[in-house]
Amino acid sequence: MSPSSTVSLTRHLLEEQRAGRINADARLLIEVVARACKSISIAVGKGALGGVLGDAGTAGEASINIQGEAQKKLDVLSNEILMEANAWGGHLAGLASEEMDHSQPIPDVHPRGNYLLLFDPLDGSSNIDVNISVGTIFSVLRCPDGVTTPADEHYLQPGTAQVAAGYCTYGPSTMLVLTIGHGTHAFTLDREIGSFVLTQRGMTIPEETKEFAVNMSNQRFWEAPMQAYVGDLLAGKEGPRGKDFNMRWVASMVADVHRILTRGGIFSYPLDSKCAAKGGKLRLMYEANPMSFLVEQAGGAASTGRQRMLEVQPTGLHQRVPVFLGSKAEVEAAVGYHARHD
Ligand code: AHM
Ligand code: MG
């Protein structure tokens, strides 16, 4: 790519601001998040050499987060990087993380802005120690008018209220995929220069697909509509769907969604009897909503199986939901199985 044709994240966001699609505060907030992602990318890239692999905690005692999951050292480090980078920027009123029990207002010593930032600092934790892609997912909401010290309840806004959402994938290359509600765009980190460069403007998910992503080992725990849906996918050309489907599952949502944004497909983490009591496996505020915003902005669809994801009214910061997202016609097909069985 020649320098004249290069569009950095900074230039892209400035152009969006001049077009009236984003204000200066939201633009600068995204820049701070992107900068934090660069630091996380460096830590992830060092791997064993950085002493960052393995579980967090001391003297054989695992560190457990609010989700009841053992934290990895990189989960904790990534959370600290995002917290530290965003605390003093002046664009935020508060932050909430998948790794923290409660949201945190920006401390009084720093200027406060009008936005709320939610993030999953390092998604796909089970892949950290085996050198497979992991990522950061984030979502930006407005702080409700008149609220200066936001509490958890102020974050409980449906996905349609998101101002921006994105993820950064730490794979063979580091990529930031972003939406501010005007398309979904991908930026690749130029490691020598240290800046994100626009490499795909207006990502578009093909409407039809022949590829699905689900953890098949949970099949026996699924609900009847999911059993029927995947059963028909597996029946191939001879079955009611009339085509052979392929399957991929990285077990890092960021990597699986990135593949779908790039070449289509459907991703699902459905309800199963193991996670039914919690409402699902994936988190609405940190995973499902930002990914659904990105997918819809790329022409795809996202649903719980029974409702458009972005219209779910959150009831808790760490709420979990079933997830179906990706190619529009395929998500509609999966939703159809739920409608017929209910
Ligand atoms: P995490 O945020 O603790 O990493 O958990 C979320 C991850 C997703 O990235 C991924 O889609 C899913 O959990 C994988 O689940 P499984 O281990 O059942 O394959
Ligand atoms: Mg996650």
Image (tube, grey):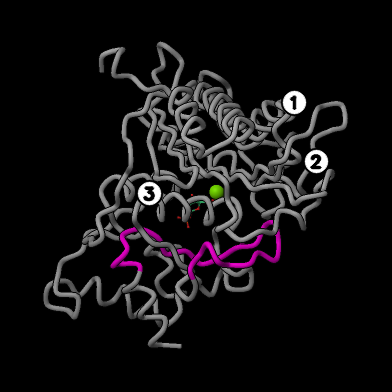
Amino acid type of the residue that numbered disc 3 sits on in the rendered structure: Asp
Q: Identify the magenta region.
A: 308-331
- Mark 3: give few (<14), some (14-19) or many (20+) Cα within 10 Å: many
Q: Secondary structure at mark 3?
A: helix
Q: Is residue 186 left or right of residue 140?
A: left
Q: Quadrant of residue 91?
A: top right
Q: Is residue 246 left or right of residue 269?
A: left
Disc with the residue nearer the chain's start (1 vs 3)? 1
On whether ligand 2 comes within 8 Å of the CB at mark 1, the answer is no
Query: 15 or 160, which is in the foreground?
Result: 15
Q: What is the x, y in percent for residue 338?
A: 41, 81
Looking at the rendered structure, which numbered label has been put on residue 105?
A: 2
Q: What is the x, y in percent for residue 233?
A: 25, 71
User: Is residue 280 magenta-colored?
Assistant: no
Q: CA distance from mark 1 to mark 3?
A: 33 Å
Q: Is residue 111 left or right of residue 185?
A: right
Q: CA distance from mark 3 to mark 2?
A: 32 Å
Looking at the rendered structure, which numbered label has been put on residue 230?
A: none
Looking at the rendered structure, which numbered label has been put on residue 88?
A: 1
State whether residue 236 is above or below residue 113.
below
Query: 157 or 304, which is in the foreground?
Result: 157
Q: Is residue 84 left or right of residue 331?
A: right
Disc 3 target residue: 256
At 60% across and 35% down in the image, what residue appears? 26
Query: 149 or 278, which is in the foreground?
Result: 149
On whether ligand 1 comes within 8 Å of the CB at mark 3, the answer is yes
